[in-house]
Image (cartoon, rainbow, N blue to C red):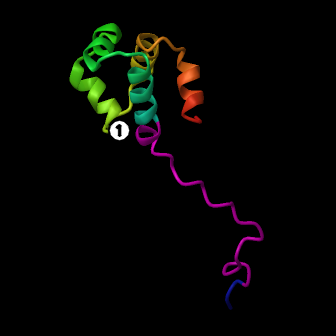
Amino acid sequence: MSDPLRHRKPAHSAPAPPDPIDVASVLAPIFRRLRVDAGLRVVDVAQAAGVGVGTVKTWEEAVRVPKLPQLIALSGALGMRPSDVLRLAGL
């Protein structure tokens, strides 16, 4: 004899999780716009943030996302608070 409860679907199913946000693609244009609006070159931002030029380029090209300490340094180099940068990006 089969168990009738074994093949029942749950009464409530959890909603599907939202699609993940491509954070790099969201932040990249913000980083670039803030830098250009501030009249800064990539090398200026890199030096002020204590990272390499290539690192800043990977952030602006949406290849990588800065880690929190890097985001703090980058935001400062751009004359912003990290929370303001994230707010501009809608995050």
In the depicted structure, whether residue 14 falls above or below residue 55: below
Q: Position of residue 45 (x, y in %)?
A: 33, 14
Q: Residue furthest bottom?
A: 1
Closest to the observer: 60 or 38?
A: 38
> SS class of the residue under badge 1?
loop
Q: Amino acid at mark 1?
A: Ala
Q: Quadrant of residue 60?
A: top left
Q: Residue at x 58, y 34 (%)?
A: 91
| Residue at (42, 27) in percent of width and height | 31
Query: Taking 15 as reference, is 58 left or right?
Result: left
Front position in the image: 40 or 84: 40
**Residue 23 colored in magenta in the image:** yes
Task: Please tell me whether residue 85 belongs to the stretch shown in magenta.
Answer: no
Q: Position of residue 70 (x, y in %)?
A: 39, 18
- Which range of residues does the magenta coloring cover? 4-26
Residue at 35 percent across and 11 percent down: it is 49
